[in-house]
Amino acid sequence: MSTSTTNNAGPIAATVYRGDAIENTHLAHVAVVDARGQLLYSFGDPRRVTLARSAAKPAQALAVLETGALERFGFDEADLALMCASHSSEPRHIERTQQMLAKSGASEADLRCGGHPPLSDAVYFDWIKRDFKPGGVCSNCSGKHAGMLAGACSLGAALSGYELPEHPLQVRVKHTVAQVCDLPDDGVQWAIDGCNLPTPAFPLDRLARLFVKLAAAQDAFAAQPSAQSSLEPRTVALARIYRAMTTYPELVGGEGRFCTLLMRAFDGALVGKVGADGSYAIGVRASAQTARIGGDKGAIGIAVKVENGNLGVLYAVVAEVLARLDIGTAEQRAALSAFHAPNMVNTMGVKIGHLALSVDLEAHR
């Protein structure tokens, strides 16, 4: 049983049933674009202005990378992956953040992100048992902040105030984000994220465009890895971010997290990143499947926004979109089955309901 009812805020993408009664409905929007940024498929409003939140981290990391900070301070690909992460505050995440700060000569006191409960229940239980009080290095965004401190240093700018919109690094980040989304600087709105850094808002299809550029850049790099000098520097940088995230998916998320399981399952064929409050983006490298979808033998980008910010529903919708587009194999998509069709049980393990998805993609070809 499913529903495709719409209201003024958008179409219903997911319906939660308790028994046979509807308990909740969830509205969503989807944009699927080709390597040129042209819309291939949509659901709801593909141009809904969306706060990308942490899904924008690859673009923010690009701005830092282009300052030369990674080479100057000896950051490796795992460090770059952590710069793009919304991690689970596992020991490996905290330790790497500390190492990044040490490499650039910064300290935890310089971080302008606060500690918070971890995204991992297992980590949270451990902290409670130890009466552990998290600091800035424990923030799920600590890698991004450590990278930005290094970027500020590389620009010769002050570390103090690196999080402020007028800081030279953030001015550079804003311009880079607009460029990579093919928008003028004033085409991006800015707010303050939960981690205290500026966060962008732009049409949903532009988020898909950002991620298709990551995938297309890796395609270009893979076609001529020994001839990097013939590629545009930004293409090389975007490909490097793609490889960092897909090589170290455990640093981008953590054990049991959707981003990590997705990138592990697809083994370099796609890159994916969640954003708080219901946004998600994926870049899929060129294949026979993307050509069939309409990618003209090029990469495709996918972006999803769930209106009420429910992350469980977001992951189910993302998995459903991958299934409807027939991305990857059935075995690869099965790695996401716990998210695609969550087992809804009560405290006694009794099944009490189910989630029905109704993401009917509209073709624009």
Image: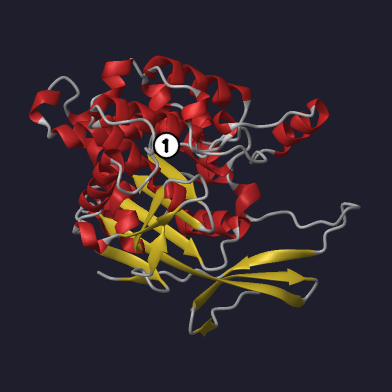
**Residue ID at (40%, 63%):** 50
Q: Which residue is identified by label 1?
A: 84
Task: Name the foreground residue: 165 vs 355.
Answer: 165
Task: Name the foreground residue: 334 vs 4.
Answer: 4
Residue farthest along the left direction in this orientation: 230
**Residue ID at (52%, 84%):** 7
- In the displayed structure image, the side of residue 356 where residue 173 appears, left or right: left
* Image quadrant assignment for residue 149: top left
Q: Is residue 325 visible?
A: no
* Image quadrant assignment for residue 225: top left
Residue 129 position in % (x across, y down)? 82, 29
Residue 362 position in % (x across, y down)? 37, 72
**Residue ID at (62%, 32%):** 255
**Residue ID at (29%, 38%):** 169
Q: Amino acid at mark 1?
A: Cys
Task: Name the foreground residue: 342 vs 103.
Answer: 103
* Secondary element type, mark 1: loop
Q: Residues within 10 Å of mark 1 (few under 14, many from 20)?
A: many
How many numbered circles are shown?
A: 1
- In the displayed structure image, the side of residue 318 where residue 206 appears, left or right: left
